[in-house]
Image (cartoon, helix red, strand yellow):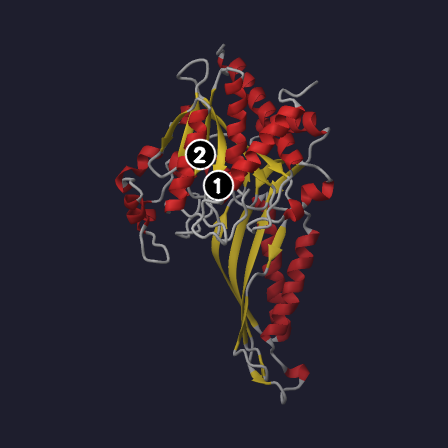
Amino acid sequence: MAVTLPDAEAEQAALRVLARSDVLAAISESPAMLTRVYLSPEHLRANQQVGEWMQALGMRVWQDAVGNICGRYEGLQSNAPAILLGSHLDTVRNAGRFDGMLGVLSALEVVGYLHRQQRRLPVAIEVIGFADEEGTRFGITLLGSKGITGRWPADWLNKTDAEGITVAQAMESAGLDPAAVAQAQRAASDFCAYLELHIEQGPCLEQADLALGVVTAINGARRLNCQFTGLAGHAGTVPMGQRQDALAAAAEWICAVEQLAEHYGEHLVATVGTLACLPGAVNVIAGQVKLTLDIRGPQDNVVSELLAHLLARAEVIAARRGLTFATEEFYRINATACDDNLQKCIGDSVSQVQGRSLALPSGAGHDAIAVAECWPVGMLFVRCKGGVSHHPDESVTCDDVAKALQAYLETVLSRAASVAVRTGRP
């Protein structure tokens, strides 16, 4: 069965996506590196540019109360629910040009195909460029997507950036009303699904020699501050067998973290990302070591099981060496499962395009986490070179993007048809 978007047309659409990625990449607070943060002049310029592209595709366009840029391509009936497509337009500092932006621009190509065919679906299509997924400026994430779900915590308006500017002040400077945040919330009946296309940000698709994959879940995460406490001593006078070396204990445990995480399966990851030794002198045995632990996985119960195992191992190591071990959890987010029906829909489309489908979890967070609180979500991953992301070397190929656009369009058409059958809409 032939795909709806022919190869030659898909290639031209992919070239447009790549060219527009370059246009957006030039909208940056620094010409030397891509940085575009929430409610900055660059963010507003990017919104304006994407809004102009939306208007050219026959969409009704608006910027909502929290700074998301939104476009609607009506269905056969003006009150039809919408399939929501999109991703984010903000970046980390010194970013690549595809994380987030690829999803927004690919969504525009789905609408572009329908617009060129003068075709309306039983459902509407809405495209959204979320305002702040990364949390680079204020240290809080998913501001845009939590805006449409109505899940903004009350204290977010008082959060400050590095210059002491609050979210409320930034909104006022951008022409938004901090008192009107609730107006960004969308009704549950507005959307029937959310589909997000995103670069994988990992090496699995490349290793499998596949352009596309289907996301099963967005990993949950637990982060902890940990501490081994022993006894500092003279590096030259304390015999090896009489030491209470906190760094040696930490090193043993770090190796155990790696080994146990591998034992629990390929989709669980555990990372010790920071290490601080006290007193931190070359000729003193470390009396105290502070370190962090980050664990992620697609199933919360398995993450909890691994964490319990790791902490128990740390206690054993500490006791054997005459030390104490303490820990405090400072961050937790549960795993977000992608909708089973949308997974199948995306998987069928991917198989149609590339012959087979690969299911994999996402180790990074996405706007789909917030959206899933209100609507079913599905995600399509696109291979990126070397799995590199959050870096200027982010790279995708035109051929992979073309395949992604074909699969994305097939998924939208399939989902629209299933909604029409279920609701009885023409």
Q: Is residue 213 visible?
A: no
| Element assignment for label 1 | helix
Task: Give how far apart the Cα atoms at labels 2 and 1 are.
Answer: 9 Å
Contact between labelled residues 1 and 2, with CB atoms less than 8 Å apart: yes
Residue 162 percent across, percent down from the top left: 37, 58
Judged left or right of residue 124, residue 206 is right
Q: Which residue is mark 2?
A: 50
Q: Residue at x 61, y 55 (%)?
A: 270
Q: Picture quarter containing residue 313?
A: bottom right
| Element assignment for label 2 | helix
For the residue pair 268 and 215, the one nearer the viewer reads as 215
For the residue pair 334 and 217, the one nearer the viewer reads as 217
Q: In the image, what residue type sits under mark 1?
A: Leu
Q: How many marks can you see? A: 2
Q: Is residue 201 above or below residue 381?
A: below
Q: Is residue 60 above or below residue 99?
A: above
Residue 20 percent across, percent down from the top left: 52, 36
Residue 290 percent across, percent down from the top left: 53, 68
For the residue pair 383 and 252, the one nearer the viewer reads as 383
Residue 167 percent across, percent down from the top left: 33, 48
For the residue pair 113 and 412, the one nearer the viewer reads as 113
